[in-house]
Image (cartoon, grey):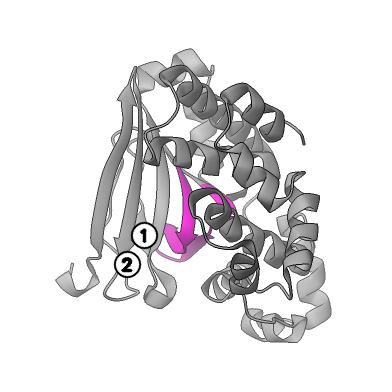
């Protein structure tokens, strides 16, 4: 492969014990081209925190991944990755040995293979668990029992998701990619229909059928998913987070945040610094 497509990769191990490894990977590409073919040596769940990448399980297939998604990389299965728009990403990576995976969930490796057919949407509670897990590890907080418990919950719930959702067509993936590159833009259905080369009516129908929600709801979830990391991991003012994410005001952001996650941004920010028992009430509220 031409070295011009090789991104600058930063890898950090956050936890490594008992067949479970958790890390953070940051990619800063110098071009949007595909990387070389890779095949992970273990089963991996990747949770984008910021940015966007695209997985290419075959030469003519692209699956876009954002903070809305969880991505399965089955052990020893080849794939390629590219970075639409060249903006890169930050990804929380959970990796299990085959032995550890079998003890956690029967037939888990088979489910990894099935799940790899698509990049699945996270449920609100899973988004919160992902961000809390990242915060705990990045700041050196949380004991092994809490960390492994959060990882086990994510594993079980994500593999259940993988059984139900079919892959979407390439035109829908192009819409996801466009939104991922500019989530704060004031998108119209006509804008996205032009990208997908469909009529607005047809896009609205196909998108809802394939993704399981209307286009507007998907864009809103992506904005909230990206804002969630800023709420949990930074001290940035909530109003600034709201405006940066494309919301009209603090109150508009808080309303939608509470509707999706069951808690206000301010309450969640206070909660992530509390004891595990108190935090669990927030995470399991929905």
Q: Position of residue 251 (x, y in %)?
A: 78, 65
Depth check, front residue: 209 or 149 = 149
Q: Residue at x 58, y 67 (%)?
A: 173
Specify whether 273 is left or right of 83.
right
User: Does residue 123 appear in the picture of this structure?
Assistant: no
The answer to which of marks 1 and 2 sits earlier in the sequence is: 2
Q: CA distance from mark 1 to mark 2?
A: 6 Å
Where residue 194 sits, quadrant-wise, is: bottom right
Query: Magenta segment range?
Result: 46-70
Image quadrant containing the C terminus: top right
Q: Position of residue 134 (x, y in %)?
A: 46, 41
Where residue 97 sits in the image (x, y, percent)? 34, 24
Image height of 12 relative to 279, above or below = below
Q: At 80% across and 59% down in the image, what residue appears?
A: 255
Residue 81 seen from this side: yes
Of the numbered discs in the image, which one, if any, rests on residue 34? Answer: 2
Disc number for residue 81: 1
Which quarter of the image is occupied by the N terminus?
bottom left
In reply to whether residue 170 is colored magenta, the answer given is: no
Q: Which residue is farthest top?
A: 103
């Amino acid at each position: 492969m031409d070295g011009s497509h090789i991104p600058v990769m930063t890898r950090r191990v956050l936890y490594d014990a008992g067949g479970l490894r958790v890390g953070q990977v940051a990619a800063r590409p110098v071009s949007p081209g595909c990387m070389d073919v890779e095949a992970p040596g273990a089963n991996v769940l990747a949770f984008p925190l910021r940015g966007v990448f695209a997985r290419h399980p075959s030469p003519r297939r692209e699956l876009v991944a954002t903070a809305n998604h969880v991505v399965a990389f089955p052990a020893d299965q080849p794939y390629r990755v590219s970075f639409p728009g060249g903006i890169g990403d930050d990804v929380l990576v959970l990796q299990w040995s085959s032995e550890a995976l079998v003890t956690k969930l029967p037939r888990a490796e088979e489910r990894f293979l099935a799940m790899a057919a698509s990049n699945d949407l996270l449920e609100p509670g899973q988004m919160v668990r992902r961000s809390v897990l990242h915060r705990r590890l990045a700041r050196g907080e949380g004991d092994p029992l809490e960390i492994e418990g959060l990882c086990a919950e994510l594993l079980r719930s994500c593999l259940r998701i993988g059984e139900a959702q079919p892959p979407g067509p390439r035109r829908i993936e192009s819409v996801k990619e466009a939104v991922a590159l500019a989530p704060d833009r004031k998108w119209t259905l006509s804008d996205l229909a032009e990208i997908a080369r469909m009529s607005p009516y047809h896009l609205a129908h196909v998108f809802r059928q394939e993704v399981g929600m209307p286009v507007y709801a998907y864009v809103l979830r992506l904005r909230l998913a990206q804002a969630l990391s800023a709420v949990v991991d930074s001290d940035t003012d909530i109003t600034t987070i709201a405006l940066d994410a494309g919301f009209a005001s603090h109150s508009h952001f808080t309303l939608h945040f509470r509707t999706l996650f069951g808690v206000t941004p301010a309450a969640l920010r206070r909660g992530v610094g509390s004891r595990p028992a108190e935090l669990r009430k927030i995470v399991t509220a929905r």
